[in-house]
Amino acid sequence: MDFLTSHLLSLILFIPAVSALVMLFMPKDEAKLLRWFTLGASLIPFALSIFLWTQFKSGVTGFQFEEKYVWYQAINSSLHLGVDGLSLTMVLLTTLLTPLAILASFSVTDRIKPYMMLFLFLETGMLGVFVAMDLLIFFVFWEIGLVPMYFLISQWGSANKDYASLKFMIYTMGGSLGLLLGIQLLGSLFGTFDLAVITAKWTSAQGFLLGYPIATIKTIAFWAFVIAFAIKVPVWPFHTWLPDAHTEAPTAGSMLLAGVLLKLGAYGFLRLVLPLYPVESHNYAGWLALLATAAIVFGAFAAYGQTDFKRLVAYSSINHMGFVVLGIAAAAFAAGTADAHIAMNGAILQMFNHGLSAAGMFFLVGVIYERTHTRNLEEFGGLFPLVPIYGGILIFTSMASLGLPGLNGFVSEFLVVRGAFPVLTVYTAISMLGLLFTGAYILKGIMKVLHGPLNEHWAHGEHKLTEINTREIFVMAPLMTLILVIGIWPAWILEVINKAVMRLF
Amino acid sequence: MTTETLIWLIPLPPILAFFLIVLFTNKNKAFSHTVAIGAALLSFLGSMYLFFWRILPAPELGKEPFASAINWIPTGDTWLKIGVLVDPLSAVVLFFVAITVLMIFIYSVGYHNYGQPAGDHDHAGLPPHGATVEENGHKHVVLSIEPMYSRFFAFISLFAFGMLTLVLSDNLLTLFVGWEIMGLCSYLLIGFWYAKPSARDAAVKAFMTTRIGDVFMLLGIAFLYSATGTLSYREIFTANTLHVLATVPTPVFGLSAAGLIGLLLFIGTVGKSAQWPLHVWLPDAMEGPTPVSAMIHAATMVSAGVYMVIRIFPLLSLDPHTMVVVAFIGSFTALFAATIAVAQNDIKRVLAYSTISQLGFMIAALGTGAYVAAVFHLVTHAFFKALLFLGSGSVIHGMEQGVLHTGNHEVDAQDMFNMGGLSKKMPITFWTFLIGGFALSGFPVLTAGFWSKDEIFAEAFGTGHLAVFITLAFAAFLTAFYTMRQITLTFLGEPRTKEAEHAQETPWTMTLPLVVLAIFAVGYGWVGIPEHFPGLGGLIPNWFHEFVGSTLAVMPEAVPFSFVPLATSLFVALGGLFFGWLAYRNVQNTAQDKLQIPVLKNKWYFDELYEVVFIKPAIWFSEVFVSLWMDKGAIDGFLHLFGKVAISTGSAIRNYFDVPVINQFFGDGSAHVTQWVAKSLRPIQSGRIQQYMLVSLVVILALAGLLFYLLRLA
């Protein structure tokens, strides 16, 4: 038990990767074994995360479950792990979504072994970013997450996969360049990469550096960080990689891409940008809010303009993540006030909520795509009588995405709007246009797929559409339960977030 | 059980019923409606017990309402609390909601043909088309049961939950939750027969139009919350908070914070209660099953809009500018919708426009400060409009039986010109509809509608809002006129079609709710007879005014009695009814109807206008501007430019430096030089010793010479 609690984070972090290595020695044709092993391997971190959640003391200041191992002594970088309320929420989201994505992948029959291994590596990569307390480690995991996703898209994707995977990879790498330089700068200045140490020294640094005023250097480094994270979130106008990558990725890949990978960007803002650059964040919050509003509004309009179901859902992510960034901008602008706390609570909860609903939506698109081999909204129509259970689940999840009160999305969007309103009034008001059109594209999706006269093509013979199966319901059930529970009783998760926010900002 | 616990429990049965039906009983129709009606009955009994045994005996409910709240969302150091509140306003609203909801639930059993056989060709998503049965060797077609019977009861249960939540909330946030849940349900129920494109489109239209109001309302809530730090009515409506809100200026139109918040919230009402200019969704919402129309247009959703704006009256009334807007929108809508109603031929659409118009009356009343009158009309309208909608559903149902009898499905069972003479075929429906219609027209003294409408007139006149008073008087005249037109065309005279001849009275599950609602459509008026009314005033205490008025911090004064509004009220009601009968008693077809004016029939072309001004541009903006031009064109074009620049830089480096300079000049060049040198030297590699010796000698001599020369220099 002692070992467990003292090594909890490294267990959660490395069990997936180690399991993937174990899979190297498994026969590649044993589909059943490979699938269930991967699922089992991803359920262990989930169980451990729940244990972590129960053991976590939200009242305690600072990081918990810290672990520190020597890694790269020459430059003073160590494998330093830890969680606070913010990262804990993201760890829970990641370890929850990964097993669901793997369960969703049971229908994959092409090269199962490398596919499943990539998912496990991906999980380690994502978790590493959330638990890293050392900038270099943060960056390493940040980049590690890219590689499996690149291969998942380029090897298991649909028609336009080469373009999409390349765009995804190059765009994110391009953003990371500035991040790497920024981290190098900090590392060489202070002789360490430890986040806590750097934050303390950096924020109080004054005077000149390398012959330039430190304010200038900070501004440049700030933008280097911001652009890297803005691409990942993605914030308008850095968003066009997302519809392509999401649309071409295999279903489970889209689930994690939308569910977790986008959160890495937002997490970067919360963990690095705001604590490291409070002054710059305040000064440039207006710009960030402008881009967030553009993401909300244009994301919603673009989603409405799609004819591909999956692209529609992909654009909805841009729309929803815009609210996260709007909350962050408001908190950056008004740091320390009650408005900032409320906006930040909303932003972080929105990250979690979007993870649930976006993963669910992508999965549901995948379910119907697997059966019909089309994502074109015009080719569906009136499918509700054929698939009543699927239809019900789709409407439920769509409503969560739409932000219907009583479901989770509303709570977080309301908090963001409430927090941002007094601080960024005009932007908040404009973003209401996006909220209005959220309704339009969600209803368009439901209308084109389920409602209207039945498209007879799917009603008979070999094309006959089959109902969602038990395994698929098992993927959706946890998501739907959480969507409803957070909608009705958000306090259990918001309390953890709130306490972390109160200390951080 | 404490009263507060009871209040918390009242909304729960319907939501449990919803989940029970969806998850477990949906295969069994009898179970499903039993669960739903049982739940509605529980909520009804709870509400009635609450009303008669807890609320009425409470001495000072206005000052000390039943309230309880719990922490819901942590917001920094504080919590956002949610809770329940029953004060006189929510008490009277809860009263009519509980009754009408239960009646609509019972009615739905008959409306969806419970007990009838499954249809021959029915399938989910379309209204039932009838089933062929064989009796004594001969076949005939009868009504068939709704294929999605259980689903209907699940949805209306959720709807009821939304309404009860809204009414019992002590704060704007959970009110908004209930508000939006009803929005969802109305979407699901208007589009209940989703395979019909018209129903599908109407559902989307309803949701989107109301959502326009909702996003403004959300802004208003956010504004109010950040200005006051709370959303609880009781905390907002304190003298201090209200004073601050009234004095803080905003940069918008010179309104005070209170005025702007009130206006934003009021836009929510404009959407939800279908006021001009967001009224367009409500008539289309008639695509839903008729109990839904009653549910949405009488008992719950549209009432919710008015309820909310009544709820925030203390805030709203702080800024006179906002009040003018409210009064204008209300009275304009009242008249505007009434003009459309006179030219409609669909029995339900007439009622739909009449609903818009009557809601306008309430809003206008509120805009003139007539708080109690607005509440009074809200309640009486809920009863008589639920009655009328259910009555019209009963008529349509009876007509459908006629249609099945003749087998001519071309005949529109909702077109009033296909009816006529139904009073003899459907006596219960006729008499109850007549009561409802008279109440709507404000038939003097007997009906509840008279008392509430009269109070609105009296208040508008007494407080000097003459423009509002005159507008509403015209609207009321039209109301009585189109109501009598409707009654005459539908029930009086002789049947104009074979289908009308074979129409039949509907089963007891449908007529019983009509009778119950008819009792309230008459009797409810008597609880609010003004004290100074000639003859009747003072015989029964004006309980309604006293009770509801006590919700406000200061009891509103009743306006002094005047004969002008009373005479107006009598004239417009009786005159409208009389002229309506006179004009339509002999009309046989639409050609003889002088009011089939295109501009009225086409609803002043608002749908067409919005299509051109908002919908088409929005679609163009989405599909062309944002998706194609901005994302695919500008942004991706820019990105692809990067790719192209990288590729052309790469190939430029290759073609202009790597290939010519490094490869050809240095690489190949050095090879060529070496090759040439080697080739040139080849002749001396002959293999002859003598030649080698000769060359060695020459080299040695040359080196020696060089050495000598160099040494000499040194």
Image (tube, rainbow, N blue to C red):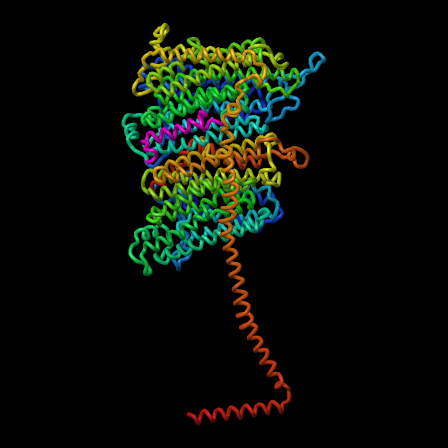
Q: Would you say residue B270 sits in the magenta stretch?
A: yes
> In the figure, residue B129 lies in which quadrant?
top right
Q: Quadrant of residue B12?
A: top left
The location of residue B578, given as percent across then percent down, is 48, 10
Image quarter (top left, top right, bottom left or bottom right) of the C terminus of chain B: bottom left
- In the image shown, does B130 or A460 lie closer to the viewer? B130
What is the magenta range? B251-280
Q: How many marks?
A: 0
Q: Is residue A273 above or below residue B698?
A: above
Identify which residue, A72 or A338, lies in the foreground: A338
Residue shown at 53% from the left, 93% from the top: B701
Q: Examine the rendered structure and indicate whether residue B120 appears above or below residue B533.
A: below
Image quarter where the N terminus of chain B lies is top left
Residue B34 seen by the camera: no
> In front: B640, or B329?
B329
Rendered residue at 60%/20% (across/down): B412
Residue B121 % position (x, y): 65, 24
